[in-house]
Image (spheres, rainbow, N blue to C red):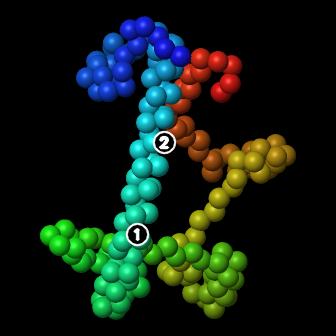
Amino acid sequence: MSISNHPKLAELVHMPIGTMVSLPADSLALLQDEAEEALRFAKATKDWIDGALALKYADAATAARQQADKETGIVRFTDGTVVIIADLPKKVEWDQVALAELVERIRAEGEDPTEYVDISFKVSERKYGAWPSHIRSAFQAARTVRVGKPIFKLSLNEEV
């Protein structure tokens, strides 16, 4: 769909917000769709480039990590005049059931488990909503609701 006098996406960075606010809803909907498509394209392009870089430099990064005697983290090496910084982040996951058992064992031995582990509790909103009111009211003081950034999706047709 094309709208006459529809501003181009590239013009938006120079457009005062007040001017954008005064645009008709159909123009805003088109701009939103164009921006989402540009973002999808940029993400796909970046993923494609990142994949090529991984293929090109994976072996060199592995060798640099081995030479540095490390399995994860950042290593640096060069390709001509370009410095390549390769990061392999460490992502540690803990077995929650095993941790709970260890916390209980530490507590049973008279130690304070919070000196060794961070302990937190979570309640899913689905479970909270399904609780009887007397249970919900007991937990109410421990619950804080914050809101996120508002989202507006404009559609020129009925689908959203």
* Residue 109 in the image: above or below residue 6: below
Q: In the rendered image, is residue 134 in sight? A: no
Q: In which quarter of the image is residue 7?
A: top left
* Residue 140 in the image: above or below residue 34: below
Q: Residue at x 36, y 21 (%)?
A: 8
Horizontal and vertical percent for residue 76? 25, 76
In the image: residue 123, left or right of residue 145: right
Residue under label 2: 40
What amino acid does circle 1 point to?
Ala
What amino acid does circle 2 point to?
Arg
Circle 1 crowding by C-alpha within 10 Å: few under 14, some 14–19, many from 20 = some
Q: Residue at x 82, y 43 (%)?
A: 133
In the image: residue 98, left or right of residue 152: right
Horizontal and vertical percent for residue 40? 48, 42
Secondary structure beneath dot 2 equals helix
In the image: residue 133, left or right of residue 147: right
Q: How far apart are marks 1 and 2 (CA)?
A: 21 Å
Horizontal and vertical percent for residue 75? 29, 78
Return the mark for residue 54: 1
* Label 1 or label 2, whichever comes before in sequence order: 2
Horizontal and vertical percent for residue 129? 77, 44
* Residue 67 in the image: above or below residue 40: below
Circle 2 crowding by C-alpha within 10 Å: few under 14, some 14–19, many from 20 = few
Foreground: 56 or 50?
Answer: 56
Secondary structure beneath dot 1 equals helix
Q: Which residue is drawn at 70% across and 53% down?
A: 124
